Amino acid sequence: MNQRLDGFEIVLGVTGGIAAYKSAWLCSQLVQAGVGVTVAMTDNACRFVTELTFATLSGRRVYRSLWSDPAAYEANHISLTSRADLIVIAPATANIIAKAAAGICDDLLSTLPAAAQSPILLAPAMNQRMWASPAAQRNIAQLREDGYHIVGPAEGRLACGDVGPGRMAEPEDIFRTIGELLTGQTPKTKRR
Ligand SMILES: Cc1cc2nc3c(=O)[nH]c(=O)nc-3n(C[C@H](O)[C@H](O)[C@H](O)COP(=O)(O)O)c2cc1C
């Protein structure tokens, strides 16, 4: 966890799973490693954790809507993805996995994979029956084929009390995977 990642820009997408609270720790660790972290949340993610948590930990405003600030309009999905060295979606619900696999863009977060100009790392997290469902397996296979990086899910006790594969990878493992993906890369902020 001591790896420095100075100058890199990461968009951290948070979707509506119970593991969203663990992404707060991931956000904090990335910031402490020198990463500029911009957080995008779905409306359902905000049922689990607050924008304030991520705004405080990242030191930046949190993006939630495509339409948030018409007075100073900027196409957030384009500006966010343009400057990102990596997009990380953690936790990645069955819903965002399905949307990304199908190219559905019906909120800010789901537009990010479609507009990406960087690698994308997903950390799936869901009940083991959802993970084992034909649709989830088909969608993950599609995303792997499309070049997405996937970390986890891990096997163990799930929030609902069931045991099986579906737990979000531990934040330390997500951090390590991020380090591996960025090692040897030059941050966009330092490119001429
Ligand atoms: C208490 C609770 C926990 C949930 N946990 C998960 C989860 O871990 N993974 C998942 O895929 N969906 C989970 N869901 C269902 C999602 O919140 C739901 O599919 C939602 O539409 C996802 O929206 P989003 O992907 O736009 O954030 C949970 C729902 C509830 C009420």
Image: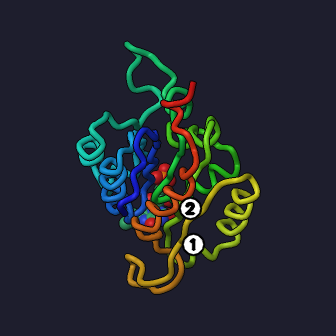
Q: Position of residue 66 (x, y in %)?
A: 48, 30
Q: Which residue is under mark 2?
A: 94
> Which of disc 1 and disc 2 is earlier in sequence?
2
Q: Position of residue 84 (x, y in %)?
A: 52, 37
Q: Residue at point 54% right, 40% down?
A: 85
Front-most of residues 52 and 44: 52
Question: In this rendering, is residue 133 above or below 116?
Answer: below
Q: Farthest residue in the bottom direction?
A: 163
Amino acid at the residue labelled 1: Met
Mark 2 crowd level (few <14, some 14–19, many ≥20, 10 Å Cα): many
- Quarter assignment of residue 17: bottom left
Query: Residues at badges 2 and 1 in contact (C-beta under 8 Å)?
Result: yes
Colour basis: rainbow
Q: Residue at point 69% right, 56% down?
A: 143
Q: Residue at point 70% right, 49% down?
A: 102
Q: Is mark 1 within 8 Å of ligand 1?
A: yes
Q: Position of residue 23 (x, y in %)?
A: 37, 58
Q: Is mark 2 within 8 Å of ligand 1?
A: yes
User: Which quadrant of the figure contains the N terminus?
Assistant: bottom left
Number of disc labels: 2
Q: CA distance from mark 2 to mark 1?
A: 7 Å
Front-most of residues 118 and 109: 118
Amino acid at the residue labelled 2: Ala
Secondary structure beneath label 1:
helix
Instruction: Name the side, left or right, on which 51 lies relative to 9.
Output: left
Q: Which residue is under mark 1?
A: 130
- Quarter assignment of residue 152: bottom right
Front-most of residues 191 and 174: 191
